[in-house]
Amino acid sequence: MKKRKRDGPNDATRENKPARATTRRDFLRTSAAAVAATALPGCNTDSADAVAFTGKATDTFDHLLVVMFENRSLDNLLGYLYEPGNVPRDQTFNGVAGKTLTNPVPPYVDDGHTTVTVRMSPGTDADMSNPNPDPGEEWQHVNTQLYDIVDPPSNERIPAEQMTAPYNAPASGQAPTMNGFVHDYVSNYYAINNKLPTFDQYRIIMDCFGPQSMPVLSTLAQQFAVYDAWFCAVPTMTIPNRSFFHASSSSGYVVNEPYMKWLSNFAPTIFNRLSDAGISWRVYYDATQVVPLTALVHSPMLLPYWKTNFASMETFYSDVANGTLPAYAFVEPRMIFNHNDMHPPAPLSPDFPIGATSDIRAGDLLLHQIYSAVRTSKAIGGSNALNTLMLVTFDEHGGTYDHVAPGPAVTPDILQGPGEFGFLFDRLGLRVPAIAISAYTRASTVVNRTVNHAAVIRTLCQKFGLPHLTQRDRTAPDLSDAINLALPRPPRSWPVTVPRPVPPSMLNTDPTSPELARRPLNPLERHIVGLAMAQFNKVEPTPDQIPTTVGAAHALLSTLAQGAFGL
């Protein structure tokens, strides 16, 4: 594989800066090096807990690494992280354990069941793909999930793109009930399959995984800092939320389609702010994916950096080992062609058994690989475990159950006009898992403060003195709650994560192989392909023009994007 240059034209160079007086950051670095050098196997490395952190949080790291997975709520993956009363140090964690939480079954199902109660997923191989099929994630579906509203009634049991105004939206000031997840799942199931699901088929939307199902994610959540009130930016699907994550805006767009509109997404990004200031950044993605989604979402603003600031995961692991991570690194899991992003699977198909096209264990394995690379990185004078803050999060909830109602949001602009569907962007999306991993993070930290996706932009702007992008990040909390130790925890004391075995079918990463090429694409995969077609062909693809299988999609993207990105 051809290697790209490690440093793009906008990477920061600090070798010729003048000498400066010793700062608290220098003290922290010196202390960190001393702790790392003296850490011995078996020593009590929790003694740093006795010294509370009182400094500037951004002085504890030189590199911020974000790993963003797909379409899972906090309850869905971490709802059973702590049993009631077992959260260390008298903290609280707002999960589902110990609570009786239910959602009503729509009356037209008429199968003798009136409610579904939250339960811990049994954790079988088949469960690792649930919810199967993929729930609805468009704004119209999320409205029903939050408010149990279908308005007008004709929106029942039809695809989101066929729904009409007011698109199941609540009345002004109406509070979410969080009671519509079963209703929406049944309705969406019917729209996909033209039949009602059985109880066993729809009750899975209320299943939440236990720690044993996701040992890597759960271990990191318990051994570093977990947020129990981190909300995504918009109550809708992937592309608007990923746009908000790096631009604090989605240019008024609420759903992924039509794709051509994203070619007009001229909202400045944090990447542009970093480049303007000479600060290094890089987006890493799996080379088999061909096209990184971040580049497509922000193509008008990031096109000049496609060859210099987008790199493969092979380069990522090399950069971690060599201490050459940029100041800001963003990792995209593999989102198409046997994805390991934890996105639910494609719609049910008689040709593909349950569990064959999606498995959350593949995402847990990727998290293990990334975390382990950071934990063992020891470069002197570059990026290493002691000076890297790692954030693990998800773009949006993807229709999976969560019991906590999202609150109001600061609109991106002071005088925010309505966007698609008349939405004002004045309320947040649902809770998603978020875990901060740092040498300066006390084990078993729970952050209860309400945080949203703008926290990353806010933190980078504070650290590097950058101009804010919109009102959303200007007023957002930062990541400082996760920094609570004055002295770093030596990496030798960090947990060694052990992922569960991943089915061999999920480890095949060759999209041209006969076994993988015939698999159907899930909705997100088709959206990525459709967005790429719009980007490179400069025309909106019709639904029947977008490939439906892995092999056909890979062949098309390889042709469209040939030579577009540096690896």
Image (cartoon, rainbow, N blue to C red):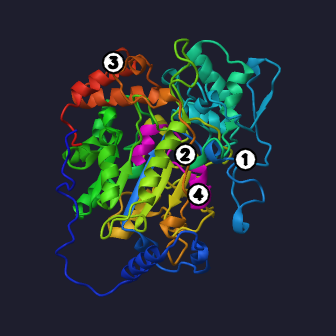
Q: Earlier in the sequence, mark 4 or mark 1?
A: 1
Give the residue drawn at x 45%, y 44%.
Answer: 241
Which of label 1 and label 2 is nearer to you?
1
- Say which element carries label 1: loop
| Magenta stretch encompasses residue 224 | yes
Expressed as whole percent of the image width and height from the top left, the position of residue 275 reads 24, 58
Type of amino acid under label 3: Ala
First reached walking from the N terminus: tag 1 or tag 3: 1
Q: Residue at x 40, y 52 (%)?
A: 248
Mark 1 or mark 3, whichever is nearer to me = 3
CB under 8 Å between callouts 3 and 2?
no
Q: Which circle, 3 or 2, is nearer the viewer?
A: 3
Q: Is residue 91 left or right of residue 19?
A: right
Q: Which residue is mark 3?
A: 552
Which one is in front in this view, the residue at disc 4 or the one at disc 2? 4
Earlier in the chain: of badge 3 and badge 2, it is 2
**Label 2 SS:** loop
**Label 1 belongs to which residue?**
96
Which picture quadrant has residue 558? Answer: top left
The answer to whether 438 appears left or right of 85 in the picture is: left
Residue at x 40%, y 68% (from the top left corner)? 387
Residue beneath disc 4: 227
**Could you tell me the amino acid type at mark 2?**
Gly
Q: Which residues are magenta?
A: 217-244
* Residue bearing mark 2: 429
